[in-house]
């Protein structure tokens, strides 16, 4: 008995098409070209009638507008790392010379992976767990690993936004609190030091008021001796984080229909602020010193491997394939949407944003160096959050109209973080809803509420007095190596087990053209080598982790690797489980494990010929 019959007498329907792309839940009237179908059917010839049984499940929701999708992907890819990590890595690795390895890594590693994920998600229309039965069932553990990694990111990433919210609330006053040394949290070493204060001498023990505000008032790190004794939870930060998670919940609870609207603000506002800050920075005295420092090429650096490792890691984490997000976002696209163009457009926007924010940061660092009469390299010795929260915050405080610039700057940081969080959680939600539709599809709001609560509880350790140490630990170990290993397996599974030719046929069915030789070579050989290169370098040169004056003891490295392995363990565990539970001989089980289930309801199509 049919649920609801829809009879399409459409000559463009590809009745042969191997992977049932017809019945992917979309009318096929928007097919790119009738080349591969029956072609233009002359009057009176045989026509193919496709009788398609559509199930009684709800149809998959889609983006309201194409722009919602593009802004969501851009908002996800452009995050805080573009603003603080890229400029720092760029000047550390030879300035302008670094752009060469960066572009090479983008063209041969980053963009092909980005394109592959969008195409996979759009064709199979499912999240990062259930998609594996259509690609290579035995690798399904990858999906679970991705979800665990996304949870770890949610534990620490939102805390950085909570710090920014604290700063934002502190900015609504005529004199910014990180400009003076007369506050209760300041120490005797506190020194306001600008070129106007000629009678002040800056020594090695001196600290700026901005640094003391960040470490002693916002983080309160001085109350915690290290990771072995984190101290109690700071209630101000707990409230800030609660507010951040409330915004996140009400942005994603209804699905891409709501988050697609919110990103119109969160993805575009940062560009507005970056432009304002760029113009402001360029007019400051000494700005050119910073720009020269940022872009002056040091070609000798290209001979060291660390530069290439940094370029590979930076482009990889910036574009963000392998977090299940691109799969989830693309799965809500129309079947014939041109995801090739989307991949090129969004990855270009992302790289240009990184480049632009380098100017925003370095014009200001040049200004600070000019004010203190020191070299730019001594001002820019800090990477990561402290670059934004100490150095940039201090520079803003010394500008005219400081309050206005502080407010828009911290708003920008919050918005940059928000749409990346929407995306990361949407990846998990889509994966779970597609994997357990009977259980969760009607209860999406409750599931999202539960997920957000878990993330909040998990983040409590980062809100303690030693929370900044936890954030750094998660950032170094929980995500980096694990994600890259997962993506390495994903590429191997798609291009070697599923097969590049089969994947290209899928893309041809969607877009009307096949990916060229360049893309095939990248997927089969270059991307796996690119990823393997990063993994090996991580293991060969483990990062030396230190924060402020605290050097992480050896046991934290063990803890870090345990956190990293805890997500990745899903992959071999699921393989074993799959082989144990499948029926038949060992060879049959293995074959079953690497044979994809065709995508789309194949069994439901009845072909009848009629004149």
Image (tube, rainbow, N blue to C red):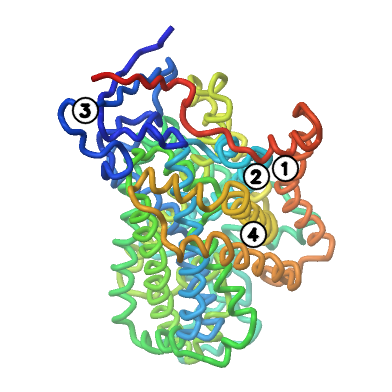
Q: Which mark is residue 142?
A: 2
Relative vertical location of residue 525 with respect to residue 303 in this rendering, above or below: above
Name which of mark 1 and mark 3 comes first in the sequence.
3
Comparing 79 with 309, the one in front is 309
Q: Are marks 2 and 1 in contact (CB under 8 Å)?
A: yes
Please indicate whether residue 40 sits to the left or right of residue 492 in the image: left
Asked whether residue 307 is in view, the answer is yes
Q: Which residue is mark 3?
A: 45
Measure the C-alpha gap from mark 2 to mark 4. Answer: 15 Å
Measure the C-alpha gap from mark 4 to mark 3. Answer: 59 Å
> Given this view, does label 1 or label 3 mark the residue nearer the observer?
3
For label 4, the SS is helix
Q: Which mark is residue 570?
A: 1
Percent from the top left, x then y, of residue 281? 34, 77
Q: Are marks 1 and 4 in contact (CB under 8 Å)?
A: no
Q: Which residue is mark 4?
A: 480
> Given this view, does label 1 or label 4 mark the residue nearer the observer?
1
């Amino acid at each position: 008995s049919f649920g609801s019959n829809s009879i399409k007498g459409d000559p463009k329907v590809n009745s042969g098409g191997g992977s049932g792309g017809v019945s992917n839940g979309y009318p096929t009237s928007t097919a790119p070209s009738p080349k591969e179908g029956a072609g233009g059917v002359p009057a009176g010839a045989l026509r193919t009638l496709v009788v398609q049984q559509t199930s009684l499940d709800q149809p998959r929701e889609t983006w309201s507008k194409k722009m919602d999708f593009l802004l969501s992907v851009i908002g996800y890819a452009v995050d805080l790392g573009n603003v603080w990590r890229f400029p720092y890595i760029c000047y550390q690795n030879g300035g302008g010379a670094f752009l060469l390895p960066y572009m090479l890594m983008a063209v041969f590693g980053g963009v092909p992976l980005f394109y592959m994920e969008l195409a996979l998600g759009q064709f199979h229309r499912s999240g990062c767990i259930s998609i594996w039965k259509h690609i290579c069932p035995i690798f399904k553990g990858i999906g679970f690993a991705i979800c665990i990694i996304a949870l770890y990111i949610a534990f620490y990433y939102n805390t950085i936004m909570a710090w920014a919210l604290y700063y934002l609330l502190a900015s609504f006053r005529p004199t910014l609190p990180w400009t003076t040394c007369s506050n209760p949290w300041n120490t005797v070493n506190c020194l306001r030091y600008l070129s106007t204060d000629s009678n002040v001498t800056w020594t090695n023990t001196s600290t700026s008021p901005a640094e003391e505000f960040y470490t002693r008032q916002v983080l309160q790190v001085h109350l915690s001796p290290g990771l072995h004794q984190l101290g109690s939870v700071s209630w101000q930060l707990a409230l800030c984080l609660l507010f951040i998670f409330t915004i996140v919940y009400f942005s994603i609870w209804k699905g891409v229909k709501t988050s697609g609207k919110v990103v119109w603000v969160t993805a575009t506002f940062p560009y507005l602020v970056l432009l304002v800050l760029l113009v402001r920075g360029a007019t400051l005295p000494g700005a050119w010193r910073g720009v020269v420092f940022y872009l002056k090429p040091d070609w000798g650096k290209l001979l060291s491997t660390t530069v290439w490792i940094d370029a590979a890691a930076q482009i990889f984490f910036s574009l963000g394939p392998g977090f299940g997000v691109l799969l989830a976002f693309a799965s809500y696209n129309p079947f014939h949407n041109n995801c090739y163009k989307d991949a090129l457009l969004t990855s270009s926007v992302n790289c240009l944003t990184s480049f632009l924010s380098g100017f925003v940061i370095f014009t200001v660092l040049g200004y600070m160096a000019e004010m203190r009469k020191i070299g730019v390299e001594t001002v820019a010795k800090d990477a990561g959050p402290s670059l934004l929260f100490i150095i940039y915050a201090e520079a803003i405080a010394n500008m005219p109209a400081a309050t206005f610039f502080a407010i828009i700057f911290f708003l920008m940081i919050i918005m940059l973080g928000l749409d990346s969080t929407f995306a990361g959680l949407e990846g998990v939600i889509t994966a779970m809803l597609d994997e357990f539709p009977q259980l969760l599809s009607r209860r999406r709001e409750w599931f999202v509420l539960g997920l957000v609560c878990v993330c909040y509880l998990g983040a409590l350790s980062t809100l303690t007095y030693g929370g900044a140490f936890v954030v750094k630990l998660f950032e170094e170990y929980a995500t980096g190596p694990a994600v890259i290993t997962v993506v390495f397996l994903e590429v191997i599974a798609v291009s070697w087990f599923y097969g590049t030719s089969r994947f290209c046929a899928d893309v041809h069915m969607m877009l009307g053209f096949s990916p060229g030789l360049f893309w095939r070579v990248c997927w089969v050989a270059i991307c796996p080598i690119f990823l393997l290169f990063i993994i090996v370098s991580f293991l060969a040169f483990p990062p030396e982790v230190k924060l402020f004056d605290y050097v992480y003891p050896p046991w934290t490295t063990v803890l870090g690797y345990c956190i990293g392995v805890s997500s990745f363990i899903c992959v071999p565990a699921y393989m074993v489980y799959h082989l144990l539970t499948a029926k038949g001989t060992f060879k049959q089980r293995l074959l079953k494990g690497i044979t994809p289930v065709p995508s789309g309801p194949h069994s439901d199509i009845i072909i009848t010929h009629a004149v």
